Amino acid sequence: MTDLTAPKLKAEILRHLTYTLGKDAAHASIYDWRMALSYAIRDQIMGPWFASTRKTWDTGHKRVYYLSMEFLIGRLLEDATINLGLRDIAEKAMAQLGQDFREIVEDEPDAALGNGGLGRLAACFMESMATLGCPAYGYGIRYEHGLFRQRFEDGRQVETPEDWLKERNPWEFDRPEASYTVAFKGHVEHRFGRDIWVPGETVLAEAHDTPVIGWQGRWGNTLRLWAARPTTMFDLERFNRGDYAAAAEPEALARTLSRVLYPDDTTYQGKELRLKQEYFLTSAALQDILRRFTTGGHAITDLPKHVAIQMNDTHPAIAGPELIRLLVDDHGLDFETALDTARACLGYTNHTLLPEALERWATFTFGNVLPRHMQIVERIDAWHKAKYPTRPHYVGIVKHQEVRMGELAFIMAHKVNGVSALHSELVKKNLFPELNALHPDRIVNQTNGVTPRRWLKMSNRPLSALITKTIGEGWEADLDRLRELEPHIKKKTFLKAFGAAKRENKVATAAWIAEHCGVTVSPDALFDVQIKRIHEYKRQLLNILETIARWHAIRQNPDADWVPRVKIFGGKSAPGYFVAKEIIHLINDVAKVANHDPVVGDRLKVVYPANYNVSMAEHLVPAADLSEQISTAGKEASGTGNMKFMINGAPTIGTLDGANVEILQEVGAENFFLFGLTAEQVVKRREDPEHSRHAIEASQELQDVLQMIAEGLFSPEDPGRYHALVHRVWHHDYFLVASDFASYLTAQAEVDRAYADRNRWLAMAAMNTARSGFFSSDRTIRSYMADIWSVQSAL
Ligand code: 26Y
């Protein structure tokens, strides 16, 4: 760690303000101060970053390469100060310069290069790999536009483009010297007994490196993002003819490859540009990996001793055929040796069972964009069929004129993993049963985790301070130590302090809500939070139906002893996901009615701040009392928000789905509000074609709620607005909202009872924090290192 003091840092900030920004302090804006501080902090990263890279080279240490189409990073400034131990020093230095550290930190735009869980997991993994001294590179795409910004217009979601690079990005280093040609299309010629790919198009992939510094600055890795550049700037023939605008076309075309993140994480569409993006990332990464490896002077068949490549879902699954292509076409290996070598390097993580999110490419598109890879894929498939003759006829990579990326990734990986215990079992049983039977040791489980540096130390300072005061330092890198809090939970003084920390966060969030939503909420109300992408399987609809039932019940009996609640929603819908957008609209309509109801008053408020992102989660998670994890069992692969809430002392109301199962196991049934059908019961329940009608007829509350919506009580200006949505619950309720409604209501009533007993609640909340150690991504990464990557810490 550095020995930087506040006065020294202050001098460094002023130096950067003058010499890097070219600004006089008297005229500096928040932006200028943020840049100056960022550069001063970045300087502190260089030492450990270089030392780590050098050490990896000198010792010939094995490296991990994490290939992901998404890295949902959020902001970096405060995170860097936390890991360097400079957070308070930076605050002091800025104060001495007359600047407010918080205001400066919040000026940074989120790097939103991801949709949701999968992208955020990649960011947590990068931080944990750096913390553990696991030599690693993350490879991704430097999207010019990350996930769209969300606004509400009359309660409807409206998307606008995101523009994080319009300001300078102080964290990245351009590496024009590290660039590779990526080819597409064309045809394959067979000459001299070899297959030679003659491409039809090429682009350049140019590296931009962001250092990722671990806890206490002991190790630094690199996140390398590729930007697409044209191989030729101008069409010279047109340029010389004087047709300047047309001459610049190739440039514009090449750049579209890294222009924008696909904003859908649910319904897969076989778009050619998406396939090109996936190949662009993968090919550039693999060329870079092989360049680094051959510089080391090893035999090419030793690749697996030095290189582990992890595919974050199937999005980079073209890595299998691409690595074979490079090994055969460029390094002269025979096909089978190349296949074995590639497989020994590759691992595949599955993040979803939803059939509509599984990637499949029409062989026509695939063969057109990647003709050589189409040949290789067919050869892999034939090789696998020949080697495993008992493979059923309906199993394979190429079927019904489609390339199935899941099967390709499975066959080309030495290990395949799910992301929670339940999910990994379902991957075996439902997704790849036949391949699992042929390769019984290949599928393993790696339950997700989150980094406690960002998600506790940085974002929840009151609780972090209490933890350090109670059990001492060091828990940040050894989260199991939170168990030492347990004996203190019996003490009134500790519980009081725990409650005070939570209340401090809630007061801040209440002010934030007033500012962002124009709604006044009491910090003593129960903050009930559901923040995640909007999807039918995540069942925000179930939550808003319960909200309506609660509103109705309060109106029926306003003098009863209600526990005041604030229902907080956050999340974006894929732009083309019609039903999800209707659910958003309904939540906003209900908020409008409930928040202005004088009979209800403070007993119920509904807020839905727009544009949920990583930074918003950092505000909301520490202030939450209750964590909503209510997906239809069997659908949520893991969830990682659920873990963030647990660490921050918010008990879960949830189904037996994803990592909820393991949260329940760790914290015990008495500290978890369980409800709903199990994954097995869900499958059974659907066998009754009238399951939803039966459930509705059995619940007077649900009948009333659906009736009120259908009558237009929440959309008086457009009474028919939700007819289709209500019809869906009655007749096409695939996600079993109706069937789980009664059980959810019961669990919510139990939440009210528990919250009313202040000490019971605080003990539950504290128990959640104390038992959350398992959900550190350090545990997850240690497990990948041992079970999949065979790599040791270089520290
Ligand atoms: C191909 C395209 C349609 C697509 C793009 C993004 C498909 C899926 C995705 C992203 C999926 C995702 O974020 N999955 C989530 O991964 C988390 C980390 O493992 C899990 O916690 C979460 O349950 C899962 O939904």
Image: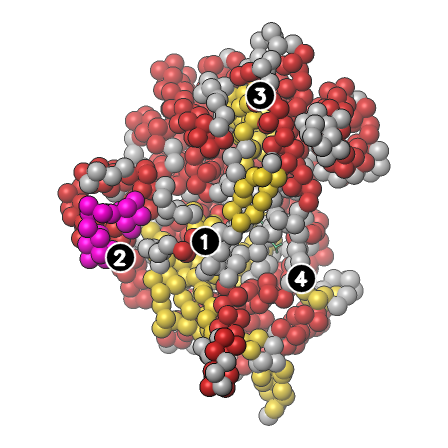
Q: Nearer the viewer, residue 418 or 386?
A: 418
Helix, strand or loop under label 4: loop
**Residue 19 within the segment the image draws in magenta:** yes
Q: Which amino acid does label 3 sit on?
A: His
Ranked by sequence position, the earlier of labels 4 and 1 is 1
Q: Do the residues labelled 1 and 2 touch (CB within 8 Å)?
A: no
**Badge 1: residue crowd in 10 Å (few <14, some 14–19, many ≥20):** some
Q: Name the kind of residue labelled 4 in the image.
A: Gly
Q: Answer with the quarter of the image where residue 305 lies.
A: bottom left
Whichever of callouts 1 and 3 sits on the residue coming sooner in the sequence is 1
Pinpoint residue 201: horizontal percent, then vertical percent: 56, 78
In terms of secondary structure, what is the magenta stretch mainly?
helix
For residue 533, which quarter of the picture? Answer: top right
Q: Cα distance, mark 2 to mark 3?
A: 54 Å
- Residue, disc 1: 163
Q: Give the range drawn in magenta.
A: 16-35
Q: At numbered mark 1, what does the secondary structure look like: helix, strand or loop?
A: loop
Q: Does the residue labelled 4 lie within 8 Å of ligand 1?
A: no
On residue 46, the disc is 2
* Mark closer to the observer (4, 2): 4
Amino acid type of disc 1?
Answer: Asp
Considering every residue shown, the one lying at the far top of the view is 559
Q: Which residue is drawn at 82% across and 27% down?
A: 694
Question: Looking at the image, do the residues carrying marks 2 and 3 touch, with CB atoms under 8 Å apart?
Answer: no
Q: Mark 4 points at which residue?
A: 270
Q: Nearer the viewer, mark 2 or mark 3?
A: 3
Tag 2 or tag 4, which sits nearer the N-term? 2
Of the numbered discs 1 and 2, the one sitting upstream in the chain is 2
Marker disc for residue 596: 3
